[in-house]
């Protein structure tokens, strides 16, 4: 089913909603930044335990809000095993998925319909990416960079 494109007025309202939500993150996020208009893009830097710092990019498009975070660089070894690990984890992720991106790096990404963007959905997105990174970063690194963990 194709999504109806948001009108400019609807996009402006969604943009204001995301701005207000992002402003409330200040203090709990390491940093919150905004791309210069006309881009509708936000950068949220989070502090974690397993992965000390990671960034979430939110990009508002005409039909959807796209979100992503850089998970791990291209594996130095065991590439097939790492990619299989990530694909199997996709089954339990809600609203996000692992994907191989530029230069064979692994990303966590997803999208929601522009009309579905509200505080609860934005919190869910951030929570999903945070939880998946905390849970799977170390095991993924031990697979793709096993030589660095030996000894």
Image (cartoon, rainbow, N blue to C red):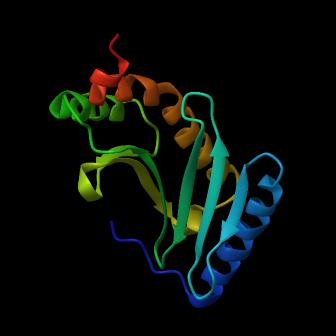
Image position, residue 114 (x, y; %): 54, 69
The part of the image, by quadrant, that contains residue 43 is bottom right
Instruction: Judge left or right: residue 136 versus residue 28.
Output: left
Instruction: Judge left or right: residue 44 versus residue 151.
Output: right
What is the residue that sits farthest to the top in this orientation? 151
Is 45 or 97 nearer to us in this picture? Answer: 45
For the point 66% across and 83% down, the residue is 12
Is 7 or 48 nearer to us in this picture? Answer: 48
Image position, residue 83 (x, y; %): 23, 35
The part of the image, by quadrant, that contains residue 115 is bottom right
Task: Answer above or below: position of 48 versus 41.
Answer: above
Instruction: Judge left or right: residue 130 versus residue 99.
Output: right
What is the residue that sits farthest to the front in this orientation? 151
Is 135 or 21 nearer to us in this picture? Answer: 135
For the point 71% across and 61% down, the residue is 32
For the point 44% across and 25% down, the residue is 138
For the point 60% across and 81% down, the residue is 11
- Give the position of the C terminus as an image quadrant: top left
Image position, residue 93 (x, y; %): 43, 35
- Give the position of the N terminus as an image quadrant: bottom left
Task: Answer above or below: position of 79 versus 33.
Answer: above
State the count of labels: 0
What is the residue that sits farthest to the left in this orientation? 80
Image position, residue 60 (x, y; %): 54, 72
């Amino acid at each position: 089913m194709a999504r109806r494109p948001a009108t400019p007025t609807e996009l402006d309202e969604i943009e204001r909603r995301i701005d207000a939500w992002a402003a409330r993150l200040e203090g709990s996020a390491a940093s919150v930044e905004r791309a210069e208009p006309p881009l509708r893009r936000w950068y949220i830097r989070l502090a974690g335990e397993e992965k000390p710092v990671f960034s979430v990019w939110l990009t508002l498009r005409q039909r959807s809000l796209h979100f992503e975070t850089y998970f791990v660089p291209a594996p130095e070894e065991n590439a097939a095993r790492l990619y299989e690990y990530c694909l199997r984890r996709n089954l339990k992720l809600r609203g996000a998925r692992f994907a191989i991106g530029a230069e064979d790096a692994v990303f966590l990404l997803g999208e929601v319909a522009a009309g579905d963007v509200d505080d609860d959905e934005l919190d869910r997105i951030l929570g999903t990416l945070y939880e998946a990174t905390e849970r799977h970063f170390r095991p993924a690194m031990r697979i793709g960079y096993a030589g660095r963990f030996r000894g």
